[in-house]
Image (cartoon, helix red, strand yellow):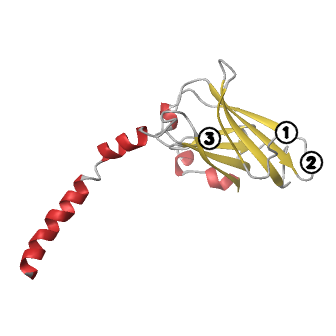
Amino acid sequence: MFRSLFFLLPVLCLQQLANCSPHNNKILSTSHPGAGAIKIVNVNVERHAQEDFVRIGEYFNGGRECGGRRCIVRDDGNVRAGLYFVINFNRPLKNLPSDLSLNIYTMIGNSHIPEKFEFALPNRRKSFTAEIYCGITSGRIGDARINAWKVELVDNGSGKIISDCRNYMWPKNM
């Protein structure tokens, strides 16, 4: 009896693996409403020092920044240290349409007046990553605490908001 179960087990496992093929997963993911739409999946707010963006390639190319597979945009391109919004999308950046920008609204400290930061996404995106680092490095925020934020992905041609994401502290009427 145990011998027959021993030979039957691999057959059952193969059948389960066949049901988990990537083609079946694609069909299931397209059956959800709104499939195909560009969405902001997650936003992390992180402070980074200049050393976090130094890569070994800079020592060989005269000090120019090598982003590697990262897509990095900053409000002051000469400064690397600052507050970064790491924004994840539901598809690789390479597959996003061209001429897009990100608007980041923040409420700093006790202020209830949002401050806007605009970032143009590069049209040539070499990586397959689905995240972008948007750095507020100009010193407008400094070490102040951000209480609320909202991120919008905007089509520059039409001005239409494609996707947005906000933290729980952002007022619902704004």
As measured in the structure, the alpha-carbon distance from the residue carrying label 2 to the one carrying label 1 is 10 Å
Q: Quadrant of the N terminus?
A: bottom left
Q: Nearer the observer, disc 1 or disc 3? A: 1
Instruction: Tell me which residue sits at (79%, 52%) in the image.
Output: 169
Say what amino acid the circle numbered 3 marks: Ile
Determine contact: label 2, label 1, CB under 8 Å. Answer: yes
Tag count: 3
Using the image, determine if residue 22 lies above or below residue 96. below
Q: Is residue 81 visible?
A: no
Indicate the quadrant where residue 165 lies. top right
Q: How crowded is mark 1: few (under 14 residues within 10 Å), some or many (20 or more)?
A: some
Instruction: Tell me which residue sits at (24%, 57%) in the image.
Output: 17
Say left or right for 4 vs 27: left
Mark 1 and mark 3 lie on one chain; the one further toward the N terminus is 3
Q: Residue 87: x and y, percent?
A: 62, 45
Say left or right for 118 vs 1: right
Q: Residue 49: x and y, percent?
A: 70, 55
As measured in the structure, the alpha-carbon distance from the residue carrying label 3 to the one carrying label 2 is 28 Å
Q: Residue 159: x and y, percent?
A: 69, 22
Q: Is mark 2 on a helix, strand or loop?
A: loop
Determine contact: label 1, label 3, CB under 8 Å. Answer: no
Say left or right for 72 vs 171: left
Q: Residue 115 carries which label?
A: 1
Determine contact: label 3, label 2, CB under 8 Å. Answer: no
Front residue of this view, candidates 155 and 80: 155
As measured in the structure, the alpha-carbon distance from the residue carrying label 1 to the one carrying label 3 is 21 Å
Say what amino acid the circle numbered 1 marks: Glu
Q: Quadrant of the C terminus?
A: top right
Q: Which mark is residue 111?
A: 2
Front residue of this view, candidates 59 and 174: 174
The residue carrying mark 3 is 72
